[in-house]
Amino acid sequence: MYTPAPPAPPAIGSRMSQSRESSSTETESGQGRQPTRLTILGQADPKAVSRRGFVQLVGTGIAMTGAVTACTKPRQAIVPFVRRPPEVTPGNALNFATAISHEGYGFGVLVESHSGRPTKIEGNPDHPDSKGRASARDQAYLLGLYDTDRNGQLRIDGAPAIWKTAAGFIAARADALAPQGGAGLRFLVEPETSPFIGELRARIQQKYPNTRFVTYSSIADGSVAGAQASFGRPLEVHHDLRQAKVIVSLDADFLDDGVESVRLNREFADAREPGSNMSRLYVAEPFYTVTGGVADHRLRVRGSEIVAVAQRLAVELAGILGRDVLGAVADLAMAEPNAALDDRWIKVAARDLAANRGKSVVIPGRRQPAAVHAIVNAINFALGNVGAQVKLLDPIRLDPNAGPEGIVALAAEMDAGKVETLVILGNNPVYSAPADADFAAKLAKVRNVVYAGLYADETAKFVANYIPVAHPLESWGDARGVDGTVTLIQPLIDPLFSRVTSADILALFLERGDRGAYALLKEFWQKRASAEGAVPAGSSFDLQWEHWLARGVLDGSAAPAVTDVAVDAVVASVAIAQLLGARGVGDATGVELAFTVDPRILDGRFGNNAWMHELPHPHTKFTWDNAVVVGQATAARMGGLKTGDWANVTLGGKEVRGPVFVQPGLADESVSIFLGYGRQGAESVAAGVGFNIGSLRSSAAPWFVRGVTVEKIGNGYSFGISQTAASDEDREPVKVGTLAEAMDSHSHFRETLARERGDQQWEIHPPIDYSKQAYKWAMSIDLNKCTGCGACVIACQSENNIATVGREQVKIGREMHWIRIDRYYADAPNYGEDKNKQYDDSRVVHQPIACQHCETAPCEYVCPVNATVHSDEGLNEMVYNRCVGTRYCSNNCPYKARRFNFLDFTGDPSEVRGMAFNPDVTVRSRGIMEKCTYCVQRIERARIDSRVEGRAIADGEIVTACQQTCPSGAIEFGSLNDKDSSVSKAQASPRRYDLLHEIATRPRTVFLARVRNPNPELG
Amino acid sequence: MPLIFRPKHNYLARLSLVVGGLGALGAVSAILIYVRTPLARGMQDPVEQPIQFDHRHHTRDEGIDCRFCHQTVETSPFAGIPSTQLCMNCHSQIWNGSPMLEKVRQSFIEDKPIVWTKVNDVPDFVFFNHAIHVNKGVGCVSCHGRVDTMAAVDKAKTLTMAFCLECHRNPGPSLRPVEEVTNMEWKAPVASAHGESHGESLGESHHAALDPQAFAKKMVKDNDVHTRTSCTTCHR
């Protein structure tokens, strides 16, 4: 029963209201709420409520309860529509198609909306890059929508203002600048593919011929410049892995980084089906990425020396394919002659590539300089992969050059006083610009700076005119996907804080009136549709528009592939030689610092997103932190650095202090540090998380720089790590075999698997016969497809209203994720072995673990209140309203799949944050056990729908949240009583095994063993 | 010194023990009885609404079907409270000057929703779905009582877990032909001792007279209803 807070003695009352206030403003931040909890619990806080005060409080409470509420629940309100839109049925969710932006590219998504509030983001099955799947980051946009930190104050001339004032201010600047053709006007923008914005920008350029748009992204790649050098034309290079048999990644995390990653993940997973067509993956990289984790052969190479791998591959391939196609490129002087590389690895990879001409591909990473992209283009062309695995397109992005050169040149102009008005649309350049641009200082030399950003971040602090903008889920717009497919971006909700979009701001330079982005966008597409004849006969533009919005893609808007280009090795080699000279690493020796893109928060743009911070990094497994990540051998050489030591990283007189994390798999003599941490803006979640490496990052060496010193200055730091064990203690929870073993039914591998599945003879509990039930729910997880990316974890978190807890709670093992992804290193020392054993070259495996829904579930026997019981269809049910929090179930769970609410992690969320909750799932409070339910709300919804229609639930009708989003399609769910269901087929696989089979829990979730496809030449 | 307690006081001591024991028992019983009363359960307590809407008039007098206003009851977890627009569909034509409808007109003109007070409510960890119940032949009256006789709607049934389980364990007796779900006065056709039909239904039930058990069985079969007592049927 809910009791309203009673009036209390003043002293206590004021403190209580204080703590309530802080808990409501810091809902997102697990750490921020910690002191509040301690105050309430009365621990370690001298000002806590006294015994006398407590008794008074309780007394008043009881009195008030009896007198006022008479033990009845407070009445709730029902607020019906005034006019119900025909498509809206209260209680039934709707899905809307829109797109979210990855470096300007549109990624098509469907957003689930309950009574007008978006509650979940899923991929759009009609979108070519998504095909219904989404990455962890895509889904985290949802939490960003409900982030109350977006509620920054609009400022003009440093004074609080409203949008109308801001619009007037900008329009006045526009008029004043028009006579000189916009000579002192500059725009700093993010990478963009929008045709609509493109047209606005073209018109501005026309009206103000002397203005300039500078595009900047701190994680821009050099692929277009590389294509210019190799193909002689600026082209966008994209990939298609459906037919790829041999893939060589040169520092490319193509399975988890970039807009293509979701699609490539699926294509790669499909090609990994054990059999004669199974593909093979070689990865050369300086730091463990998701892609590196699933490699058949991984080579640890420092980032700056990847170019040497590319060059030696070219040399080897020139030897095999003939000098006429690649000779000139192979003859270029070695850029990194001193790189100590494993020649055998490169030779074998080259032979494998050559043996699979037209069915192989080399993929360069975003951090690699244009020279590497150009060499790789030449190699792919020589191998006949261009047109097959490598797709070329004319630039989709409005300005494909978003590297640091542009912003440095802009900063120089600002310094010279040539910029009178600077309009910054997004980007947060004060934080993200290279250190040598010294952007914050140069901003002071520009008379008028207008900054439009989502948050009152670092840049907002330095400008007089700040305009908070609308979230992508609140805005109108459009964007193109990797292949050019256009998606209209439509708002899911009336803007919560600000309705301004960058299109609104750009439009002020063209016309008076502030018509809003919707009118402008629709007018643009109407003109374009009539010009291109896109409206079919008998239809109207409005109908066409509705169709586009409903589907999420404009049919046939994909760009045609460019096929009429070739790499002339001789011509290309001249350009490549130039690029090699301009690589920017120089001849410096010593330890290399690699600026690493955090797969969760990227360069800080997800820095205020608690879901992203709490998602453990796929390999290091730390949360809510940044670290100086050092390889094991290198840490030992650096004087025995250990995880938790404090270190100074010094470069050219500048130093950055951070905690050390020793991690296997790094290139020797290199350290990796994530971008995007140590934020100084007004974002409450990002504040105080990690440290910022930005001061060491220059435009000359934006990714790799040599000659840093790492010096231990202290110790005693502890990370919030979700998994501290590196070894599986030889228990082999993840079964791994080679392709040859998997194909041989008498191999030890297959025989082990056969032993570890199915019924046990000595079971204590006789098996229950579920075959008479209509359904027998079960799941299978294919470890051969799982990359450990964490998309399922976030999907689950979003679907099931799972709380975030903050670093301090993660440290003591209280994270709430229903799915945890275990990671084991094959060569890690077991208990009792030498702890200092190095295993930098170890293989790594991942395994998602959620509740296994055991038929003979150990948790159920020990619950004293029957709060966890079995359903007739074999679900292990968790009944929150019965749970009293003994935690016996968790103690008895052999998979450790249960999560306990030690504190009221969700608390009283703000009204805005509360809108993100899925209304079909209970929000749990303190003292409650919870765990994976197989998304029972989706099961029950499907059951009701099917029973209303008088039919059975079809296979594939129930898709759990994790299964729905898994980019590689590793998860299957369905009924085992249907022999043709996909899960029945998966469970019948010869690779199936049951985790902890020996304890006879009869889990309903089973795993499919992982299969490696090593090259016999490398073993 | 005279004794304060004399032997005859033993009687008082024993009596006070008995009275004390009975009192304690009584106090516990009183609480247990109290929570089972309509008062504690918030029943039979007509709720004041912003507009004095009379179901008697609309349902009994005018014969309007429940689903005319509660439109989403067959397709959604929520039965749906009618939009102002729906009220105005009729009341822009009839009684369009009535002072009782002033708030409706105001809501319609100002585009501000009418805020009604919820009468029948279950806890937040209970996920009740109207669509499946209505589609399987559970009558509105089974949970909401005779709304057609209520001047102001009150909570007619306990809506406790025991109330739900009674039917979830043995659905048959609570089922009726699907076309009769909104009929407030429907009664199962019962067979008398002489084999004559005593179907008192005002609705046109053509079901042959059966004994109640056989009729319940028939309903379970006709409406394809199963017992559903797994916890996650309602709690998730």
Image (cartoon, helix red, strand yellow):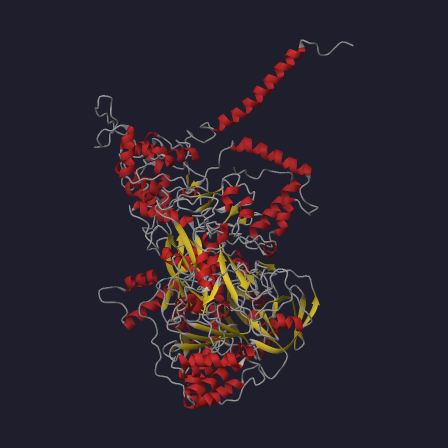
Q: Position of residue A989 (x, y in %)?
A: 39, 60
Q: Is residue A515 above or below residue A797?
A: below
How many marks on residues?
A: 0
Residue A209: tell me if it is visible. Answer: no
Q: Is residue A376 left or right of residue B172?
A: right
* Rendered residue at 54%/25% (across/down): B28
Q: Position of residue A604 (x, y in %)?
A: 54, 66
Q: Is residue B59 above or below residue A294?
A: above
Asked whether A863 or A689 is in front, the reply is: A863
Q: Is residue A699 left or right of residue A649?
A: left
Residue A587: name its quadrant. bottom right
Q: Position of residue A86 (x, y in %)?
A: 31, 50
Asked whether B135 or A159 is in front, the reply is: B135
Asked whether A993 or A962 is in front, the reply is: A993
Residue at the extreme front of the image, as rendered = A746
Residue B234: name its quadrant. top left
